[in-house]
Amino acid sequence: MIERSYLLVKPDGMIGRGCDDAILDLSQKGLIIEGFKRVTLDRDQVAEMYPEKVGSPFEKDLHDYMTSGECGVILVRGEGAIGKVREAKGKTWSSGLRLSHANNFIHNTFHCPDGNEERDRELKILLKRLEKKNET
């Protein structure tokens, strides 16, 4: 089934080869890169993106990390896109793109949705800032 998904490149991945490596890996998995957007998240957006982390011991570290610089949103389309993006991203910092780019549990360089509902909810949060920017 043809699906749409995205890979979020967190601030540390925007430095060095994180984006380039991600785009290459996603393309090699047969996914079509539909677009790339740069976004700068604020604390409210981070809380919306990661509601399960609100009130956790590492909430402040996550907010500080995610608001420390630009993030990149790589939009993709293709057969089984959601699963292929998850595979490319890897788990924690022990496989996939995270193996070669992530530093630890918080600074894990990449994020992607688990399914269609999460994708739609998160893209609305991520791209909200771009819509506001374009209105001015």
Image (tube, rainbow, N blue to C red):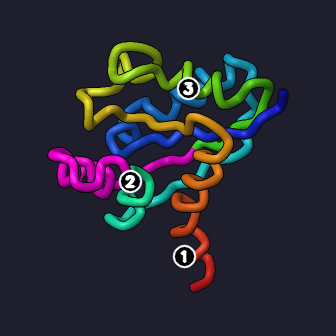
Residue 4 is situated, as x and y percent measured from the top left of the image, at 73, 39
Q: Which residue lies at the image location 25% right of the left edge and 27% below the top edge?
A: 103
Give the mark nearer the N terminus: 3 vs 2.
2
Give the mark nearer the N terminus: 2 vs 1.
2
Q: Amino acid at mark 3?
A: Arg
Please determine whether, in this image, residue 53 is positioned above or below residue 110.
below
- Does 69 sit left or right of 8 as displayed? left
Asked whether residue 15 is drawn in magenta, I would say no
Find residue 69 and report its image quarter. Answer: bottom left
Mark nearest the camera among 3 and 2 is: 2
Q: In the displayed image of the protein, which residue is found farthest to the bottom?
A: 136
Q: Which residues are magenta?
A: 51-73
Mark nearest the camera among 2 and 1 is: 2
Residue 37 is situated, as x and y percent measured from the top left of the image, at 58, 53
Please determine whether, in this image, residue 55 is positioned above or below residue 81.
below
> Badge 3 is on which residue?
86
